[in-house]
Amino acid sequence: MLDRVAQAQHIIEEACRGLDRQITVMEICGTHTVSIFRSGIRSLLPDKLKLLSGPGCPVCVTDQGYIDTMMQLADREDCLIATYGDMIRVPGSDGSLETRASRGNVKVVLSSEDALQLARDHPEKTVVFIAVGFETTTPATAVVVQEAEREGMKNFCILSNHKLVIPAIRALLGGMNDRIDAFLCPGHVSVIIGSDAFTEIVRDYRRPCVVAGFEPLQILEGLAEICRQLAAGTAEVKSMYKAVVTEQGNTAAQRIVAECFEPADGYWRGVGKIARSTLALKEQYRQFDAFQRFGLEDKPGKEIPGCRCGAVLCGLMDPIQCPLFGTRCTPQQPIGPCMVSSEGTCAAWFKYGRRK
Amino acid sequence: MVQVRAEEVTRTMATEPERILLAHGGGGQLQNQLIRERILPKLRNEVLNELGDSAHLQLSSNAICFTTDSYVVKPLFFRGGDIGKLAVCGTVNDLAVSGSRPVALSLALIIEEGFETRLLEAILQSISDAARQNHVSIVTGDTKTVDHGCADGIFLNTAGIGIKLPNVELGLSRIEVGDKILINGTIGDHGMTIVSQREGISFESPLASDCAGLADLTCTLFENVPGIKFMRDPTRGGLAATLNEIVEGSRRSVEIEEKEISVKPTVQAAADMLGFDVLNAANEGKFVAVVAPDAASECLRICRGHPLGAEARIIGEIVETRDVPLVELKTRIGGRRIVQMPYGRELPRIC
Amino acid sequence: MCLAVPARIIELEGDRAVVDAMGNRWKAKTTLLPDAKLGDVVLVHAGFAISTVDEEEAKKTWELFAEIENFENTSNKISG
C-alpha cells in the first residue's frame, strides 16, 4: 500500500513542480472532509496544493430557518421527530434537538424506513422525518414517501431539505468562489447521479472533475489524477471509483426521486438562495410535506453575528481565520453548524489538526 | 455464567414471573428473605454471612487502594457479559491499574419494582462468578428498591479495596519522553457491542464485549517488571480519552501509530456502518500502560503469554512537545493528525 | 456526505434483505436495486442498498476488499 501512496505523492509533486502557481482543489463531500482529516492527507501534500472543503456537509448547509422550523415541530406535543443522528446537536436560535431529547419525542433513526415504522407504531402522533442529505440519501426518503402513499398513512410527513450538488458547484464557479481549479467529486453521490453528471461542469467551466472513493489511498490517487490533468492542461471527468460508480448512475433511484420530487429554489447556510438547488415534494405527494401540513414557511433564518460558516463553506476562508473559531465556537459550545456537524470543516479542523 | 439473551428481558412469560416488590427494599421480612434466599447463597463467604453493618477485614498492609464505580449500562445483558460481570470487573480493573491486588468489594443494588427475580438471580450469578475468577470477595452490601421506571431495571455500585503491591510507584509525573505506550489487545469491542445491541440494528452479530478482570495480568507485570510508570483502563471515551488524560496530566505529548492499533474487523465494520470512531469506543478488558523504554519488550512478552494479553501491542510513545501537549496519530498512509478528547456521546450518522 | 459500507446479501425476500458486513448482520432494502441477487456485495447507505459492488474492480483499489476477502476466507479476525 505504501508504494501506491508514494506513487501518488510523486505524481502530485511532479505536477505541482511544473505549475508555477498555487493549485486549489475543492472537495464537496463531508465524508471526504472527514476522511482527509482522519488520514492526515494534508500533511503529505506539497504546500502548492491547497485542499478546500466546500458545501458538502448537508448539516452545515442547512439554513438556520429550517433548523428553527424543526425545533418548532419538536416542541409540539402531537409530534414525534425522527432524525438521522447528524442533526441532533445542530444549534437553532434556542437550543438543539439534543436539549429537547428529555421530552422523549426525538428519535434517532438509521434509516427512513425506521421513521415510517415509528409512524405505524404511534398512530396517536404525527411523525416528522427530518429529510436532509444530498443525492445519496434522497432516494431513501422517496421510497418511504411512496410507501406511505400506498398505505394511505395519515400521520407521517417529511420536513424536506434535500440538496443538489451540481447547482452548488455552478453557484460557486459562477460567482461565489471562482478560484477553484478542480473538484474532487463525491463518490457516493456519484453512485446515484452517475459520473456523467459532472460533464456539464467540465463543458461549461473547464475544471477537472475526479470522482473518488473514501479510503485515504483512493482520495490520494484522486488528487494525483487531478494534478495530472492540471499539469497537462486538460479537463475531463474521470471516475476512480468504478467499483460502484457507473456513468449513468443508479437509474432506478433517479426515477423514484423524480417521481416524488422536483427542483426548487433553496436557501443554503451563509450562501443564500441558490436556484433549483433543493428538492420539493411534487403535488401528488404534498400531503406528506410537513411545511404544508403545519402551515410553516421555508424562509431563511437570522444570521448569527460573527458566524462565518458561509465563507468557510464556499472555501473562501479557513476555519482558523474565523474570529469565533476555537474561542467562542468550539465543539463543546458550537455556534454554527460547521463546528457542530460531525463532518463540518470547522469541527474537523478543531478535532484533527489545528496546526495545518 | 448464566447466558441470558437480551430479547428475553422484554419477553413476558406465560405464567406471571416472580418480581421484585418495593417491600424488598424496606428493611423488613421481605428484604431479609431476599438476602438470605437469593443473595447470600450466590455470594457465599464468611465475612458477608455475618451480615454486620460493616465488614471486618484483616488486611496484610495499610497501604491500600480504594475505589468506587456505579454501573448503569443498558442493555443489562449483552454478548460477553452483563451488568453484574461489569460491576465486578470494572472495579477490579480500577484497583489493578492502580498497582494493587484487589481483595474485597462492596455491592449495592438499586432495583426497580417489578424487576423479574430470575434476572436478578442471573446477575447475582454473574457477580459471583466474576468475583471468584478475580479472587475477590463481596464482603458487604446494600439493597434498595425504587418505583417502577426509576432505575432502568437495576443499577449497581461497587466499591473496592486492593492491597498496594510493594515497589510500585505509578504517577503521571513519572512519565518521560521516550517512554513506550502499550495496550493489551484490540479496542472498541465493548463499546460497539453495547451500541449495536442497544440500537437494535444488528439482530445477529459475533460482536462481544471484552469485559474481563485484569488483576492477574497486571499483578504479574508489576511483580516482574520495574519501570512501569502509569496505567489506566480506557473505559468510557475509549483510547482517545485515556491518551488525552495522560497528555493533560503529564503535560507531555503522545504519538501513536495507527497501524499498531488492533481492531477486530467485525468491530470496525460496525463502527463504519454507524459512523463511529473506534478510538472513542469503550473497552472493559483493556489497560493502557506507559513504561520505560527498556521495560517495553518484557511487558509485551508477559502480556502475550497471558490469555488477556495475546494481542498486546506497543502502540506509541511519549514525545517532545512542540507547542502545546497533544496526542498525534501517525496514520496508515503516513500522514499525521490530532486525536482529540471525545465529546462524550457518539451518535450514529449517515453523513 | 455519505457513509456507505459494502456488505454481502445473505438473505433476500422481495426487496427485504439481510446483509453481512464482517459478521455483522443488518437489515437493508433493495428497492433501489431491483436486480440485486443473493450473494451480491452491495453498498449500503441509510438502510438501503444503492449499488452493487464490482468485486474485481474493487480488489484493485479498495483496501477494505482485501480485508473482506481475508475475513470471509480465513479465520483471521484481527486487523491493524
Image (tube, rainbow, N blue to C red):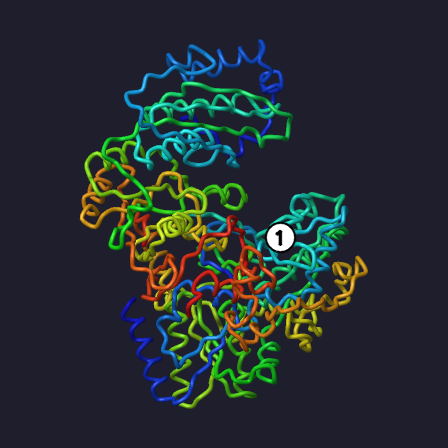
Q: Quadrant of residue A298?
A: bottom right
Q: Is residue C14 left or right of residue C73?
A: right
Secondary structure found at label 1:
helix
Q: Is residue B41 left or right of residue A144?
A: left
Residue nearer the viewer, B339 or A184: B339
Query: In the image, what residue type sits under mark 1?
Result: Glu
Q: Is residue C3 left or right of residue B291?
A: right
- State the residue at coordinates (37%, 70%): A43
**Res C1 visible:** no
The correct choice, above or below, for C32 with respect to A24 in the image is: above
Q: Position of residue A294 (x, y in %)?
A: 80, 57
The correct choice, above or below, for A148 with respect to A232 in the image is: above
Residue at the spot of label 1: A113
**Res B75 visible:** yes
Badge 1: few (under 14), some or many (20 or more) residues near its Cα, within 10 Å? many
Q: Chain of mark 1?
A: A
Q: Quadrant of residue B330?
A: bottom left
Residue nearer the viewer, C73 or A343: A343
Quarter of the image with the C terminus of chain A in it: bottom left
